[in-house]
């Protein structure tokens, strides 16, 4: 068991940093953004046209899984924290057993809004996101990739429908031919076919099943009883929401798809697994939605978390999944 403290750095660029805007490690901010945004009750039923909404303050937990992303992770974190949000945010980054310089770069992050978690071994993107969910303190969560395929400037746009009280869940969708770059025809076509399958199975009309940007109330996400540890978690989340009768509000976002040569990890076999997950969720009984109270965080503090086998819960932080057996240790630093 190990607990590491964040290390303050001078802002020097790491060797091998990608070209483009400065990829300097994130330094502590002198102040916190104090804005608030009204949001729907995350435990409420899907909002229909003309429905009234009980507004409450919104706090966003951005979840990031990172596996061997030394070329991009520092820049992504910097850009996320530098974006202008209408509410308080926290960023939870999970190093999923990286074997490159990713852990070292994450150790240099020093910002009170950031929590770093570590898996001793690679467990999969889904497991990493579920670990992040287990320590999230926001009213809503939003996954965000560590590979520069999405841009943080789109996050405030995804938040807007929540502030207007028109919906419960928002998807930032990729529209082919509009602010998007797909590296291969097969990848784009595969996503469309699987999206169509989901629409047929659940009588829905989604545009982009596998978008990373899924803004979901934390209580709703926890009620889905998620179990996928790999890329299939994306499909399981959407299938679970559709099974509950929730139809996400869609907002167009930018997408810069990367190739496998550039580090993309999803493969054709993940598409077959996605189809199986959609069928499994459709054929099982609809999950019961649990009502949970939101707990307001007591200020923004830096937290470094280490996840290891054979858990002994500390500070009542739940484990990422029922089967991981990961230890979650939460250390609070000044």
Image (cartoon, rainbow, N blue to C red):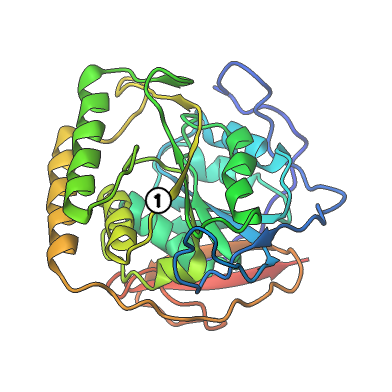
- Residue 55, given in percent of the width and then of the height, sits at 67, 68
Observer-nearest of 269 and 53: 53
- The residue at which mark 1 appears reads as 96
Residue 122 shows up from this direction: no
Which residue ends up furthest to the front in the rendered image?
50
- Residue 250, given in percent of the width and then of the height, sits at 46, 42
Taking the spot 33% from the left edge, 29% from the top edge, the residue there is 264
Local SS, label 1: strand
Taking the spot 21% from the left edge, 39% from the top edge, the residue there is 196
Q: In this rendering, would 148 be left or right of 23? A: left
Q: In this rendering, would 75 be left or right of 257? A: right
Residue 210 shows up from this direction: yes
Taking the spot 86% from the left edge, 52% from the top edge, the residue there is 31
Q: Quadrant of residue 318?
A: bottom left
Taking the spot 33% from the left edge, 63% from the top edge, the residue there is 245
Q: In this rendering, would 142 be left or right of 224? A: right
Observer-nearest of 312 and 290: 290
């Amino acid at each position: 068991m190990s607990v590491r403290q964040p290390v303050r750095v001078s802002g020097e660029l790491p060797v091998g940093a990608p070209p483009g805007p400065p990829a300097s490690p994130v330094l502590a901010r002198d102040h916190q953004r104090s804005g608030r945004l009204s949001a729907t009750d995350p435990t409420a039923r899907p909002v229909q046209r003309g429905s009234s909404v009980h507004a409450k303050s919104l706090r966003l937990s951005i979840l990031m899984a990172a596996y061997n992303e030394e070329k991009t992770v520092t820049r992504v974190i910097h850009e996320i924290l530098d974006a202008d949000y209408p509410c308080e945010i926290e960023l939870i980054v999970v190093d999923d057993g990286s074997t490159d310089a990713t852990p070292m770069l994450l150790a240099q992050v020093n910002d009170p809004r950031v929590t770093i978690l570590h898996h001793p071994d690679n467990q999969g993107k889904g497991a990493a996101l579920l670990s992040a969910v287990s320590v999230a303190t926001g009213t809503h969560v939003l996954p965000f990739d560590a590979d520069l395929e999405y841009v943080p400037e789109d996050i405030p746009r995804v938040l807007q429908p929540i502030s207007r009280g028109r919906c419960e869940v928002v998807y930032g969708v990729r529209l082919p031919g509009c602010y998007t770059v797909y590296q291969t025809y097969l990848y784009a076509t595969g996503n469309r076919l699987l999206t169509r399958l989901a629409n047929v199975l659940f009588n829905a009309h989604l545009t982009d099943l596998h978008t990373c940007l899924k803004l979901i109330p934390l209580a709703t996400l926890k009620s889905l009883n998620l179990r996928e540890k790999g890329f299939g978690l994306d499909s399981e989340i959407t299938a679970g929401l559709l099974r509950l009768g929730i139809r996400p509000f869609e907002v167009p976002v930018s997408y810069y798809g990367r190739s496998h040569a550039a580090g993309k990890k999803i493969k054709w076999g993940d598409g077959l697994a996605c189809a199986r997950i959609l069928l499994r969720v459709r054929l099982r009984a609809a999950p019961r939605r649990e009502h949970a109270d939101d707990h307001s965080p007591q200020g923004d503090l830096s937290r470094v978390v280490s996840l290891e086998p054979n858990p002994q819960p500390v500070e009542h932080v739940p484990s990422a999944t029922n089967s991981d057996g990961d230890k979650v240790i939460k250390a609070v630093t000044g």
